[in-house]
Amino acid sequence: QEQLVQSGGGTVQIGASLGLSCDGSGLTFHEYALAWFRQAPGDGRVFVAAISRSGDNTYYADSVKGRFTVSRDAAKMSVTLQMNSLKPEDTAVYYCAARQTPYSFVTSNIRDHYNIWGRGTQVTVSS
């Protein structure tokens, strides 16, 4: 069964750093482009960051550019979101997502392009 298992998250103070991880299971990991989305209370699920199959291309939402870094480890079949300089508006449930694609360098910020999702992990940034 194809699944993504998330770890990390928690409660941190403004300006702190936090890392999220997402491990693939039951899928041919190198065939999948990956992404992170987040959902704040009362809001829809929005794009945060994406990384291509090859890992050479990344794409970020303007709100996190320069603070967040997405990376993938083929050997560990995992994708990581490193979050620095966290702000209260980063508070949300974070989801990793995967989409199978024949293209090595393509990324996507479109939620409906992804068909495998992690269960989500809470990140809370408090003052």
Image (cartoon, rainbow, N blue to C red):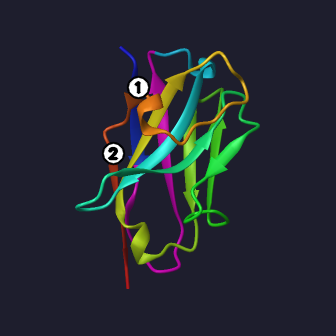
Res. 2 image quadrant: top left
Dot 2 surroundings within 10 Å: few (below 14), some, or many (20 or more)? many
- How would you classify the magenta stretch by its main secondary structure? strand
Q: Residue at x 29, y 58 (%)?
A: 43
Does residue 77 appear anywhere in the picture? no
Res. 95 image quadrant: top left
Residue in the foreground of this view, choosing between 102 and 97:
102
Q: Residue at x 55, y 66 (%)?
A: 63
Residue in the foreground of this view, choosing between 123 and 92:
92
Where is residue 12 shown, x and y percent of the image? 41, 73
Where is residue 42 shown, x and y percent of the image? 23, 61
* Label 2 vs label 1, nearer the camera: 1
Q: Residue at x 49, y 39 (%)?
A: 110
Where is residue 30 shown, x and y percent of the image? 63, 21
User: Is residue 1 depicted above or below 78 in this figure?
Assistant: above
Q: CA distance from mark 2 to mark 1?
A: 15 Å
Asked if the residue under mark 1 is in contact with the one under mark 2, i.e. CB atoms within 8 Å, the reply is: no
Where is residue 64 shown, x and y percent of the image? 57, 63
* 11 inside magenta stretch: yes
Q: How many marks?
A: 2
Mark 1 — residue?
115
In the image, 104: left or right of 40?
right
In the image, 15: left or right of 26?
right
In the image, 100: left or right of 66?
left
The stretch of residues the image draws in magenta is 8-26
| Residue with the most extreme bottom position | 127
Does residue 101 appear anywhere in the picture? yes
* 35 inside magenta stretch: no
Mark 2 — residue?
120
Please state which amino acid type lies under the numbered disc 1: Asn
Please state which amino acid type lies under the numbered disc 2: Gly
SS label for mark 2: loop
